[in-house]
Structure formats: C-alpha cells, structure tokens
Amino acid sequence: MPAKTKYELPLGAATREAFGKALVELGRTNPNVVALDADLSKSTYTAGFAKEFPARFIECGIAEANMIAIASGMASAGKIPFAASFSVFAMNKGFEQLRVTAAYPNVNLKVVGTHSGISIGEDGPSQMSVEDLSLACSLPGFTVLSPADEISMIELVKLAAAHVGPVFIRAGRPKVARIYEAGQPFTIGQAIELLEGSDVTLIATGLMVAESIRAAETLEAEGISARVIDFHTVKPLDREAIARAARETGAIVVSEEHLADAGLGVRVAQVVAESHPAPMEFVGIQNTYAESATPEQLLDKYGLLARDVAAAARRVVKRKR
Amino acid sequence: MQKTSDVAQLAAITKRMRRTAIEMITEAGSGHPGGSLSAAEIVTTLFFDVLRHDPDNPHWPDRDRFILSKGHCCPILYAVMAECGYCPKDQLMTLRKLGSMYQGHPDVRFLPALEASTGSLGLGLSLGLGMSLAARMNGGKSRSYVVLGDGEIQEGQIWEAAMAAPFLKVDNLVAIVDYNQIQLDGFVKDIMSLEPLADKWRGFGWHVVEAFGHDIAALQNAFGEASSMKGKPTCILAHTVKGKGVSFMENNPKFHGTAPTREECAKALQELA
C-alpha cells in the first residue's frame, strides 16, 4: 500500500449521478425547473426528477433534435429546462437546434451531456463525446461547464439554473475522485487553484483534474513545483488565471478528456498567446476516435493518466528559457 | 389594434398586407414573395381575429404564440405585426438593410415581439410544442400556432415533433401547412412528394382539417375546430397558391425567392389595388 499523502483523493460519485441529485434539489426549490430526456433517463439520472416531478418531466423518445428545440420553446415560455442525453447525441444531433433555437436567440436553455469523453468504456466511439466542448464553445453566448467531481457538479448545476442564458454542462459516466469538500464556493468563469506551484501550471477540466493533482505529486518528488488549476468553466474562460499562470510559472500543460486540438487546450493557448506567451503542452485525445475497452484501459492507451500529464510537464519545463 | 371577425374587413386588410410585402421585397431587392403571398390570409386571420394577444403588452405570459417556421416568408409577418402595432410601419421598407429590425429572416434580437428566430427550416413545430407544453404546465389558456412551409416538412425534425405532440396529448398546438405546392427548386411533387399528406398527419395522431387557404371563412372555421379539439393537436392543411394575388407570380417557382423588379412591383400593386 502506498503511503497516504496530501494528494490522496477519495472515490466519489459519477458527475452524472451528482447532476441527477442536484436536479431533484433544484426541482424542490424552483417550480420553473423542468427536465427533458430522450430515452436515457436512467443513464443521465434525470429519472429521479421524473419520479418526483412527473408533470414537469417530458420524455421525448429517441429524438434529440426535437428535444432540444422543445426545451428551447419551453425556455422561451418562461421555464428553466434541463435537457439531458449522452453528450454525443445532445451536442451532435442537437447542434443545429442548439445554434438556431438557443444560442442565436439567447434562450435560457440548459443542456446536459452525460457520458462525455472516452471513459464510458465498452460502448465505444459511437457513444463517446470527444468533440462536445469544441461544439459547445463555438456557440456564441453559451456558458460551458465541465465539473471535475460530484461537489462541483452539484454547485454548478445550481449556478447554471440561476444564470440567465444557454448553458452546456458536461458530465461523465464513471465514478470519479472527489476533489472538493462540501461548502466549497464556485463562481461561473472563475477557475479554482487547487495546488500552489511555481515551475509549471497544470490546467485541467473534468476527470483530468484528479490526474493533474496526482501528476503534481510525482513532479514534486522530482523537484518540480506544479500549480494545479481546475477549469470547471471552459467558457467564458478565466483569462486572469491563465495570464497569471503564464507569467508566474512560465509553462503550462492543459489536460482534457477531449480532442486535444479542439477543446480547452486551444482556448487556453489563445489566451496565453494574447497575454503572456509561454511554452505549452497538451494532454488529450490525438486526432482519433477510441475503441471498446474498460475505462481504465482506454485512459491508459489514449494517454489520459497522471503519468501522461507529468511527462508533458517535464517536456514543457525543459522548453522554458 | 382593432380585432375583427368580419371576412370582408379581413380580406381588405389581407390585400393591403400583400401590397406592403411586395413593396418591402422590391425595396430590399431580394426576398421570398411567393410564400409571403400564399400565407397572407393565414397570417392576417390569425393576428386580426384568432390570436389572443396584445401588441401593447407583447410579453403577456398567457398570450397565444405565433411561430413562422417558414421564416423566409417574414415580409408578410412583419407587415401584419406592424399593422397590429408591434413595430413601426415607417421602417418596413428597411427590410434586409443594415441595422433594420426587419431582418432577412425573423430574429428576436432585432424584433423582440417575435416568438422565435427562424429561417433554418424544420425547427418551428418543436418550438411551438415546447411553448404549448409550458402553457399546459402553467394551467394557462395559451395556444401555439405554427405556420409550416410544404417544402419545409421534408425536414425530419417536423416528423419527430409530429410524433411527439399527439403522444403528449397536446391540444393547444396548431400546425398550419401552407400547401402551395412549390419550393425553391420547383414543384414539391417533383422534388420530394408529400402525398398522401393528410393521411400522414392523421397517421401520426393529429386532427386534420383541410381548407382553401385563401378562404378566410374556411380558415376561421378550421381554427375554431382546432380550438375545440380535445386531447390531440390539429393540423390545418391550407391549400394555397404560391404568389397568390399577382398573376405573373402565381404558381411560378421563380418567385419563390426572387424579388420583383420595380416594373413588376408596379404591375403587382395594380393587380392588388
């Protein structure tokens, strides 16, 4: 057994499960909150809301495009709809609807994509969303949230409901490490520095936050001081946190369970280029689709472990002048 | 605004709306006259007789909703909304010009009294369904009216919404198909036939009313029948003539998306005098 360190992270609930819990809590406090699903309510965890508030739940059948536009119509009529599906279906099949019925008229729609990334495992690439952050961020006016653990998901769902305007929330299938204690404050658009560090900054979102914390532990043993920042909000970006990281640590690694050339990393790079140019490395899926296997095997094969973040950190530190 | 159920008055308003739409499109130099003319009686009858709405209070929560899903035919909608008092008549001729509230397709950012931004075909029925569901949850009287193009319903999402609305027993939703038989590339029957169209809607669980879409009394009856229908939505198949009212535009695919010249406009206005 490895020694218990300050980096030890207990296993928590899946973010999709936390979403379902938060949605029920919201339903109890806000009668305007409604939910929609497309025949995946047991997987997206909207089933709890459906059970407690059947009159405020719309089962849309397997028709995601229709679901998104129905939800937009409900939002236009004053409801706060949470439309949920696997992220790959909500974003890809519903993209035109998200564009024309939500982003363009700036409608108060909340879309929740579960089963994001490749950590869904055995179901394979047709069910894996590796483009969703890119798609969501490309929509003008959208807020894009990507919580790392159950605590952040619960808080961010509440903030999403209170925010007026379209929001995409990215959730995952597997149980993930618990990063936060209950009571941790969150603000949309404000990244959270989890570990202080001066040699390199590890920026991450979703389940890569835990991997980045673990990478920081490895790096510390090697004498590299790594700052770790959780970007639970991918849009709007916390530009100040990025500029400060570039200025103070002079090197940045961005890690995401998403295509590396289309998600958080390229968005952070734009801010780095505009504010304080610094060497960067990117940990993510490299211009490919994954395959069927266990989540652990996939995260290993496609390079999304602490080991990969640490390797990128070593490379980027070497590139510092 | 003065609402009326008088057919002669509604016909007179419709004729003026046709003239305004033609003038707007001519002034813009581009746009879609054919579908504006085919939908003229439908839009006028809804706004001046059927809809529960208040131009002085455009965001009254329990108002009826109107969605022009075939958004390219917005000139007729803008003309009617301006006539109702939602928006200034003296700016109608700025259609499609920089900064105009009268955008090339309906845009709620520029004209907040619109219920939806449309233009990408196939989305409006789902939006109307969402608005009807919200109204039902609120226990309100609000009904949603969605005008669909016939070519538009070749889009798959229309049939997703068509399947969902009867299943959800939504009876405060009315789809009106402007069945003018022509789309951009030619006649609907040659591009992608919709027939048997009434059977399709019935098969999906809708109450279907067929009416001549330029007969105001027939439209009034159809809307009345829709309002009394319980437990299912109503589809009004409005058989119309593309370019109705202007001889050289009628049944002419060219005027789906071509603005008239000044000379053509003058001739059209003469015919609509």
Image: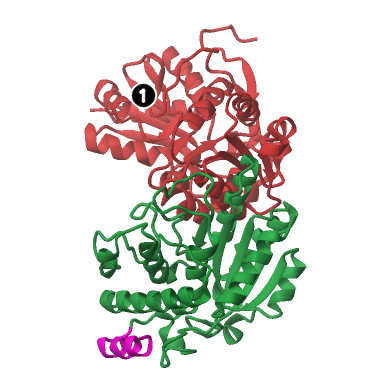
Please state if A79 lies on the left or on the right of A50 as rendered. Answer: left
In x, y percent, where is residue B268? 35, 88
- Give the position of the C terminus of chain B as an image quadrant: bottom left
Would you say B58 lies left or right of A244 here? right
- Residue type marked 1: Thr
Q: Quadrant of residue B160?
A: bottom right
Tell me if residue A275 is in the magenta stretch.
no
Establish if B150 lies above or below B1.
Answer: below
Examine the structure image and report whether residue B263 is included in the region drawn in magenta: yes
Region in magenta: B260-273
Could you say whether the residue bearing mark 1 is in a helix, strand or loop?
Answer: strand
Chain that the image shows in red: A
Image coords of residue B264 (percent x, y) = 31, 89
Residue topped by disc 1: A201
Q: Nearer the viewer, residue A125 or B36?
A: B36
Is residue B167 visible in the rendered image? The answer is yes
Horizontal side, residue A24 vs residue B61: left or right: right
As drawn, the chain in green is B
The residue at the point 63 percent across, 81 percent down is: B193
